[in-house]
Image (cartoon, rainbow, N blue to C red):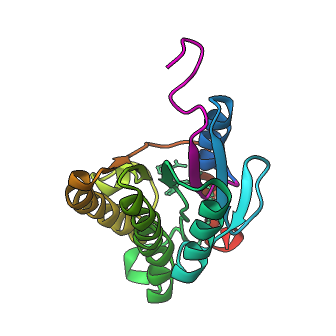
């Protein structure tokens, strides 16, 4: 690699939820490092090539993967970042529908999108996936937020990433999770369940 070239130069990298917050920050940094960045989101964002995808929907994500492959021939990386927070409410009052809605984006969405990108990468024989989990999936966080649906989803994501990593590493696809603490984004400041979808 030439001295002034980064490891991301010329790489094709897709990021779900790249229209806002952490995903947008990752997209900006990867673009600055020379990657060709595809922003998979239900909303258009300011950077990258926007490809509409709802991570809950396997057909929508498969179409997005096919669009990227048709344009660039291969996919080097995928960041599974899309997520919602859901309403702040005690478990005793939590609507089952709210629990399902948060799980559908934050856990099912990670499964659906990693499966679609993983299939493409397994066919190539290599690829890198980074999943944005959360500290709240691993421990009780001492903040006054009552978002048990979110905690449950992130715990599931952490376990899912372990399973993916073990299954796919021998076939050239590396899967890792990052578990951030609090980062000031629209999600951290409000129930994004409604304005995100
Ligand atoms: N902000 C924090 O403090 C924090 C901490 C730990 C982990 N995280 C995680 O980081 C990730 C990004 O969060 P953020 O804070 O940047 O939130 P954000 O609300 O700023 O951005 C989330 C993005 O996901 C997109 N999105 C939502 N549902 C989608 C769907 N069904 N299909 C496709 N795109 C969808 C939204 O349109 C939005 O662009 C989430 O997985 C979140 O759980 C955030």
Question: Quarter of the picture for ligand 1?
Answer: bottom right
Asked if the magenta segment contains residue 165, the reply would be no
Please report the residue visible at 49 percent of the width from the left and 20 percent of the height from the top. Answer: 1
Q: Residue sitting at 46 percent across and 70 percent down?
A: 116
Specify whether residue 14 is painted magenta. Answer: yes
Instruction: Residue 83: tell me if it is visible.
Output: yes
| Image coords of residue 158 (percent x, y) | 30, 58
- Above or below — where is 3 with respect to 94? above
In the rendered image, which quarter is residue 16 located in? bottom right
User: Nearest the camera: 135 or 44?
Assistant: 44
Residue 18 versus residue 11: which sits nearer the camera?
Answer: 11
- The number of numbered badges drawn on the structure is 0
Q: Position of residue 55 (x, y in %)?
A: 55, 72
Which quadrant, please, contains the C terminus?
A: bottom right
Q: Is residue 128 left or right of residue 40?
A: left
Camera-nearest residue between 151 and 177 = 177
- The answer to which image quadrant residue 2 occupies is top right
Residue 185 in view in this figure: no
Q: Residue 88 at what x, y percent from top left?
A: 52, 67
Of residue 191 and residue 31, the one placed in the foreground of this image is: 31
- In this image, 56 relative to 47: left or right? left
Main secondary structure of the magenta stretch: loop
Give, as a single range, the part of the protein colored magenta: 1-19
Q: Residue at x 63, y 61 (%)?
A: 68
């Amino acid at each position: 690699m030439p001295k002034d070239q980064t490891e991301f130069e010329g790489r094709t990298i897709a990021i779900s939820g790249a229209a806002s917050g952490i995903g947008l920050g990752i997209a900006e940094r990867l673009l600055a490092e020379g990657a060709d960045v595809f922003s998979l989101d239900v909303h258009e964002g300011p950077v990258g090539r926007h490809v509409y995808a709802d991570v809950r929907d396997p057909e929508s994500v498969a179409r997005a993967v096919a669009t990227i492959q048709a344009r660039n021939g291969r996919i080097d990386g995928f960041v599974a970042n899309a997520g919602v927070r859901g309403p702040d409410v005690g478990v005793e009052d939590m609507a089952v529908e709210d629990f399902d809605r948060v799980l559908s984006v934050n856990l099912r969405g990670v499964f659906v999108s990693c499966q679609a990108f993983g299939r493409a990468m397994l066919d190539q024989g290599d690829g890198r996936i980074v999943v944005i989990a959360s500290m709240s999936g691993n421990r009780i966080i001492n903040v006054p937020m009552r978002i048990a649906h979110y905690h449950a989803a992130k715990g599931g994501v952490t376990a899912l990433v372990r399973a993916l990593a073990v299954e796919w590493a021998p076939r050239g696809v590396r899967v890792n999770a990052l578990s951030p603490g609090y980062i000031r984004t629209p999600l951290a400041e409000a129930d994004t369940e409604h304005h995100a979808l």
